[in-house]
Image (cartoon, grey):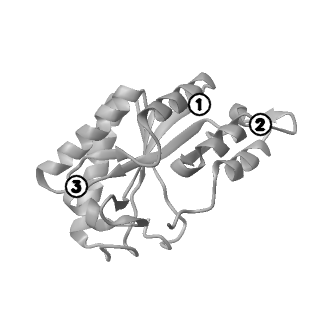
Amino acid sequence: MRYYNMTLAAFAIIALSITTQAAPIYTWIPWYAINDANKVLDSEYGGIRADEVISHVALQFWHMRSDGSLYIHGTTMEKTKSLIQSLKDKNIKVGMAIVNIGSEETGYDSFDWTIVRPALSGDTLQTFVDNILNIADSLGIDDVNLDIEGEDQQGGPWTDEDKDQFANFVGILADSLHARNKTLSAAAYGTNTYGA
């Protein structure tokens, strides 16, 4: 399984070095580190609580399918709802991170653009957007974070059509989220190392 080793703990330590919150501090919790993340959020470093400086947390639980549907991987809806409520009780805005890491059939060891292409095509695009909005609305999600990668993994390289479809998807989703007073963010790297 290829996941990045940066966890909420690392981000919390960075965030806690800032004594005043000049800008939003956005981090994520992967499904495999929920317990560790809760401990960090409840920790104090140098007299400052992590939950006092972290403004946004994206839950990296949602995996996309090529038919535009989404499913939670690695946890349950009950635990997800409990974590969302815990974060909101701490005045932390909650995001849902959507990833294209493998599938039930292929395993979860890499980002896979072959999942993305059909989800952004034709009528499936609106189904995908509607499914995202329905989940965000029903759970009180504040932000949707796109962690959709893959040019250097399965299904690459990207074509011009891929880029156009992705840009179209982002525009439609952003407009729909903004109309609901929700935000859109994206996981991005300073290099193209992971095809982000």
Q: Residues within 10 Å of mark 3 (few under 14, many from 20)?
A: many
Q: Quadrant of residue 106?
A: bottom left
Name the residue: 38% across, 68% down: 150
Q: Residue furthest left?
A: 123
Q: Quadrant of the C terminus?
A: bottom left
**Left or right: 65, with 57 as reference point:** left
Question: Alpha carbon of mark 2 to alpha carbon of mark 1: how far?
Answer: 15 Å
Q: Amino acid at mark 2?
A: Ser
Residue closest to the eye, 192 or 62: 62
Q: Residues within 10 Å of mark 1 (few under 14, many from 20)?
A: many
What percent of the width, then of the height, locates residue 53? 70, 36
**Left or right: 165, with 31 as reference point:** left
What percent of the width, then of the height, locates residue 71? 34, 45
Name the residue: 60% across, 22% down: 89
**Label 2, on which residue?**
43
Determine whether the residue tagged by mark 3 lies in a helix, strand or loop.
helix
Determine whether the residue tagged by mark 2 lies in a helix, strand or loop.
loop
Figure check: 27 above or below 109: above
**Label 3, on which residue?**
119
Name the residue: 19% across, 49% down: 125
Question: Alpha carbon of mark 2 to alpha carbon of mark 3: how far?
Answer: 40 Å
Return the mark for residue 92: 1
Question: Alpha carbon of mark 3 to alpha carbon of mark 1: how far?
Answer: 30 Å
